[in-house]
Image (cartoon, rainbow, N blue to C red):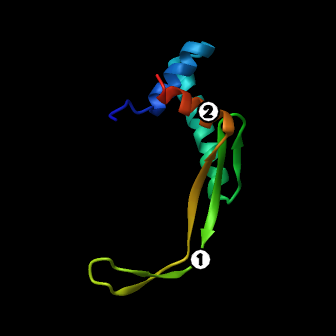
Amino acid sequence: MAGKTLTRMDLSEAVHGEVGLSRNESAQLVESVLMHVSDALANGETVKISSFGTFSVREKAARIGRNPKTGEEVPIHPRRVLTFRPSHLMKDRVAGGNKR
């Protein structure tokens, strides 16, 4: 399942083609949107994009884990993790793409 990876450059080229901004302005626009999203998530806010999905930050509590090789118990420190929940429209679109 070796597919192409969508990059920032691809997004800015799409904006350039669809909106008609210069390549430099398109790159700045994409960078600005991504910066707003990442800043909101870093501040613990939820980012919801209609028909796409919801990004949120979740707090995971400390727990005891186990090294599978040695069986030794090790503490896992509390941490924040990023989660993504796709919308139903996105799930349907992705599922439909697999049938082609």
Identify the residue at image location x=37%, y=31%: 3
Whether 11 is drawn above or below 52: the answer is above
Residue 51: give x, y in percent of width and height.
69, 34
Marks 2 and 1, the one that precedes in the sequence: 1
Task: Calculate the distance from the C-alpha at mark 2 to the C-alpha at mark 1.
Answer: 33 Å
Q: Quadrant of the N terminus?
A: top left
Disc marking residue 92: 2
Q: Amino acid at mark 2?
A: Asp
Task: Identify the element where label 2 is drawn.
Answer: helix
Residue 9: give x, y in percent of width and height.
45, 28
Q: Residue furthest left?
A: 69
User: Does the CB distance between marks 2 and 1 fall below 8 Å?
Assistant: no
Tell me if 31 is positioned left or right of 67 in this view.
right
Front residue of 29 and 60: 60
Front residue of 73 and 30: 73
Task: Say few, some or many: other residues with alpha carbon within 10 Å of mark 1 (under 14 / 14 to 19 / 20 or more).
Answer: few
Task: Say few, some or many: other residues with alpha carbon within 10 Å of mark 2 (under 14 / 14 to 19 / 20 or more).
Answer: few
Disc marking residue 8: none
Identify the residue at image location x=53%, y=20%: 14
Whether 74 is drawn above or below 23: the answer is below
Q: Residue furthest front?
A: 99
Identify the residue at image location x=62%, y=57%: 42
Q: Amino acid at mark 1?
A: Ala
Whether 54 is drawn above or below 44: the answer is above
Residue 22: image quadrant is top right
Task: Identify the element where label 1 is drawn.
Answer: loop
Per the image, the residue denoted by label 1 is 61
Residue 25: give x, y in percent of width and height.
57, 23
Tell me if 49 is positioned left or right of 4 in this view.
right
Q: Nearer the viewer, mark 2 or mark 1?
A: 2
Residue 80: give x, y in percent of width and height.
57, 66
